[in-house]
Structures are given as structure tokens and as C-alpha cells.
Amino acid sequence: MSGGATGEKQDGGGLAGKGERIAKVIARAGICSRRDAERLIAEGRVALNGRKLDSPAVTVGPKDLVEVDGTPLTSRERTRLWLFHKPKGLVTTNRDPEGRPTVFSVLPPDLPRVLSVGRLDINTEGLLLLTNDGGLARVLELPSTGWLRRYRVRAHGRIDQPALDALRNGVTIDGMIYGAIEAEVERVQGTNVWVLVGLREGKNREVKRVMEHLGLSVNRLIRVSYGPFQLGDLAEREVREVRGRVLRDQLGEKLALAAGADFEAPIRQPEPPGADLGQPKQRGSRAAKGTRAPVEDTREAPRQGRGRRGPPRVETADPHSPGRAKPENPRPRAAKPRSAAEEPRTAGSPHRRRTEGPARPPETPGGKGRRTRNADRRRPS
């Protein structure tokens, strides 16, 4: 399907100049960047209202149906941004023809489909911005945005500060013009030197080519900031989302409008594993919510034989009675009560040893049958 001039009716779409360009709509849905969306359209993989497109010069409205590879675009999601500490050895691409590991292959599974803001070389580490909004990614990549990108560079060789100050006026290398670059010697470490570099364009291999132009051989490159966002204490491969209010404040009204950022749309929840297999979701069940592991009862078992029942019994097998249990510590039998003649009183003893028997101490006047401690002393001899 071919597109016409601005203001003319497009086949299957709205009026050019009204609504949004289809590549922009695809990018904001988080499918890919605008450039990749135009490539998908050229490959015939995009359809508008059931008809395949062959030109990106088409605008779409809210009632138009856009499909990519036969799948309709999902509803728009809130604009979000993440900070990612890229380690060395990962390629910033969705698919690498050489089979090398990519940035997107190591991201957490609960992260939605995201795009990278710019790229980092395979041997470059540090801060990489990720977003679910292709319009925001495109705006933040533009040099006209003016966001400064800072790098810490470790290079082999020697350099003085005046040579780095000359980069503020820009430099031309092999016909390639590079804009103003801020550079400062941070420290010297043996035969290496650490340089803090700041630039606003971010052309391909710009830092390494400029350092090589000055006679330095870069052996480590770390991006420490991108605009107002800092690498800070972010660990390698760690992902941290920027809060919506912070993102809105840092973008400002101008950049947010240029990117078409939407901070009012809902946040789409990631689909659970197996959701695309046609299995119904279990609501309100333990299988859906997750079951708790059984908790071991660590409370002490109640003691047996408290008080007058004697010590706790341990059941062991009785060798004399097979199949029956016999207590290991049998309850001792009560001693045979002694008579008064067998247990004489001792001189000076205020109490008589209590013995078991039917005899009870006599009542004392006014005692109403109660026993007193010195009842034996008041008995007549």
C-alpha cells in the first residue's frame, strides 16, 4: 500500500497530518524503534485495518487497527524508564547474528518489553537506559536534546591537560567531525591514565577514536551518567526503575511533549509463565497465589506427670512382656507408714515428721478443726 502527500486520504488510514505516523505508534507500543518500525513496514510485516502496508507515510487514529506479524498492538502503557548496569561482554541488540549474549537476554523476566536508549559497545560497561516508550528513546538519543554523557576512560599512555582542553573546540578525525568534548585527567595509575570524558553526541566509537587520536590506547570504558541519571552504586546486571514523578521532573514539559510521554496510562502487568498456552488463570486458589510451606511446630510438648503424678515416663519395650510397654522409671511405691513408737520425737525438734495414717492432730480451742504448726507443743503431757 502506498502513501500519498500530506492532507490526502491514505489507503486504510486516516488523513496525513492528523493523528500519528504509524512508525511512531509502533515505537510507542514498545515493539521497536521508529527506524525498525519503518523496516518492518518495508518488509510487509505491518497491516493497517487488515491491509498490509509498504510505506510508513501513513497516519493512524485511535479507531484504526494496527497489526505487526499478525498480532494487534496492545493498549498504550505508561511511560517508564529503567537504569541498567551493563557488564562487559554483552551486545546491545535484540538478536546478534554471531550468537553473542545480548543485554536483553539477561534482564529480569518480570520486566516488560523495553528498548535501549542508544547503544554501548560490547567492551563498554556502565549505565544503559531502558524504556518501554520508543518515542522517549528516540528523543533522548538526539544530540539536540543536549544531555551530557559522562565516561571514565582508562587508557595506556601519557596525556596532559592542555591537550585535553583543546577538545572543547571539537576535532575532525578522518573526515568525521566531532563536537565539543569535555575531558579532564582524573589520576595516573602506573602506565595508565584515567580520564573523565563528557560529550553530547555519542557517535559510534567516538570516545575511543578521539583518545587514539591523542595517542592513548583505551583498555577500559565505563559510562557513569546519562543526563541527570547516574550509575551510582548500581551493581552489575542490576536494574532499577526511575520513579514516575522523578522521570517527569527530569524530562521537563518540553522533552515530555516532544517524546509524547504518557504518565497517566495504566501499567500493564507482565503475563505469568504459561499464560500464552491457553491455560485458564486460577483466581483465589492456593495454586495461583502460592502455598505456604508447612511450618514446623517448635512448641515444647506438654510435660507428663506434673505435680503429684511423679516424673515423666519414658516408654520402652518390656523384655518380659512382648508387645507391651513398660515404664523405664516406674513410679516408686509409697513407704509403709511408721507408728509413733517406731518414730520417736527428737529433742528440740519443733515439728513432728508427717506420716500417712488415719490419725489426725487434735483440735485446738477456737481452731474449728484446723491444724496448727505448734499443735503438738500445746498438747498436755
Image (cartoon, helix red, strand yellow):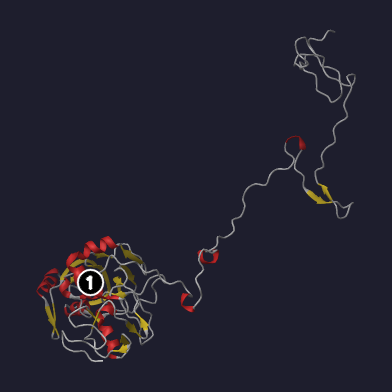
Q: Residue 22 appears at what percent x and percent y?
A: 25, 82
Instruction: Find numbered disc 1 in the image and state the secondary structure of the residue it sits on.
Output: loop
Q: Which residue appears at 49% of the width and 71% of the height?
A: 281
Question: Which of 233 and 313 lies nearest the eye of the viewer?
Answer: 313
**Residue that carries the numbered disc 1 in the rendered image:** 260
Quadrant occupied by the C terminus? top right
Query: For residue 95, what is the image quadrant?
Result: bottom left
Q: What is the x, y in percent for residue 334?
A: 85, 33
- Placement of 5 over or under 118, stated as above or below: below
Residue type, numbered disc 1? Gly
Please state the horizontal and vertical placement of residue 125, each as a whole percent of the image. Answer: 30, 73
Name the residue at 36% across, 76% down.
104
Q: Is residue 222 above or below residue 292?
A: below
Placement of the N terminus among the 4 image quadrants: bottom left
Please, which residue is most extreme toward the left here? 169
Badge 1 crowding class, 10 Å Cα cut-off, few under 14, some 14 to 19, many 20 or more, is: some
Coordinates of residue 8 in the picture (x, y in percent): 17, 86
In this picture, residue 371 sits left or right of residue 181? right
